[in-house]
Image (spheres, rainbow, N blue to C red):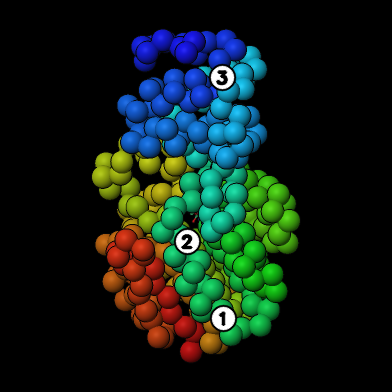
Amino acid sequence: MSTSSSEDSELSAGCAVHEALHWAAQHLEAVDGRAHQQARWLLAEVRGQSSTQLAADARAPLTEAQRQQFTALVARRVQGEPLQHVLGHTNFYGLRIQVSPDVLIPRPETEAVVEQALALLANVEAPRIFDAGTGSGCIACALKHERPDAQVAAGDVSEAALDVARANGTALGLDIAWHSFDMDAPDAAAAVPNALDLLISNPPYVPDHEADTLSAVVRDYDPPEALFTGPDALRFYRALAQWGYTAVRPGGHLLVETHADGADDVARLFRMHGWTDVHQNNDWAGRPRMVWGRRS
Ligand SMILES: C[S@@+](CC[C@H](N)C(=O)[O-])C[C@H]1O[C@@H](n2cnc3c(N)ncnc32)[C@H](O)[C@@H]1O
């Protein structure tokens, strides 16, 4: 071994893959229980290899550039930066989605919302879909990937987020129309395609006064405009329920992700605005995390 056992040690020049992994796991143990796995993911990224290729190359030496890059990535992770930001991408519904500090890191519970969207559209040919507040574009990309016959459009108020979403659509070879759009504007319906079969959204849903209840990693690394609603937690659901009724065709659906404590309020709001067959569903952890309704 050319590394010492001290956690403060530097990674030696010319070290082998297995030595670099051992060194990184020692450092990463302080921040993550999956230290060995994270070390493998980070080194695989640096070497442009899969984890399997990495294992096969266990005795191969790192180049100096790889050693420096790996050391820098491990240091960022040790300082608490989420793995997805350190890598610059994540996996969402089987797709590689690029992320940046300008977008919310796609969450596993949102995959359950995509699953529900696909179920609602199962019998609709060439469905027309709009994803409001698209962020990284993860929902729009997953839906277009699963339903190549769909006409998918998506919008966000953040131009920086739209740049990331557009890059994801292009990298994945998906034909999606990206719109600069404010879902809180009175004329929002005019800015989206009409006669939608599905209006889908994972909007911001944390009222400002609950900021302290968020974990530090969410507060520090997700963009505030992706999280906070101002004083009213229902602000964006109210807007979507209102203008969505114009944008969605009769028989079409509005489907939203919600806060685990907010699904009942959102369902009530949907009914108030005329949506029928309003349902809630749980995420894979058993918490109510989505609401949908049908335009009658
Ligand atoms: C919770 S994030 C969801 C991002 C992505 N859809 C996902 O599920 O990972 C909410 C998104 O809504 C966007 N947003 C916030 N206010 C908006 C507004 N008034 N109009 C449109 N998008 C908005 C944010 O920029 C952010 O990308």
Residue closest to the eye, 99 or 83: 83
Q: Which residue is mark 3?
A: 16
Type of amino acid under label 3: Ala
Q: Which amino acid type is marked by label 1?
A: Ala
Marks 3, 1: nearer the viewer: 3
At label 2, the amino acid type is Glu
**Does residue 10 appear to the left or right of 6 in the view shown?**
right
Task: Check the image and report above or below for 172 versus 218.
Answer: below
Q: Position of residue 124 (x, y in %)?
A: 61, 83
Instruction: Quickly name the residue at label 1.
Output: 122
Real-space CA distance between mark 2 and mark 3, rounded to the nearest whole angstrom = 38 Å
Relative height, residue 222 to residue 293 (above, below): above
Circle 2 sits on which residue? 111
Residue lying at 47% horizontally and 13% vertically, measured from the top left: 1
Whether residue 148 is visible to the viewer of this picture, yes or no, is yes
Q: Is residue 157 visible?
A: no
Nearer-N-terminus badge (2/3): 3
Q: Position of residue 6 (x, y in %)?
A: 36, 11
Measure the C-alpha gap from mark 3 to mark 1. Answer: 50 Å
As drawn, 246 above or below 50: below
Residue shown at 38% from the left, 56% from the top: 205
> Which quadrant of the view contains residue 257?
bottom left
Q: Residues within 10 Å of mark 2 (few under 14, many from 20)?
A: some
Q: Seen in the image, is 59 located left or right of residue 25?
A: right
Q: Residue at x 44, y 52 (%)?
A: 107
Say which mark, if any, is on residue 107: none
**Residue 16 image position (x, y, % from top left):** 56, 19
Does label 3 or label 1 sit earlier along the sequence? 3
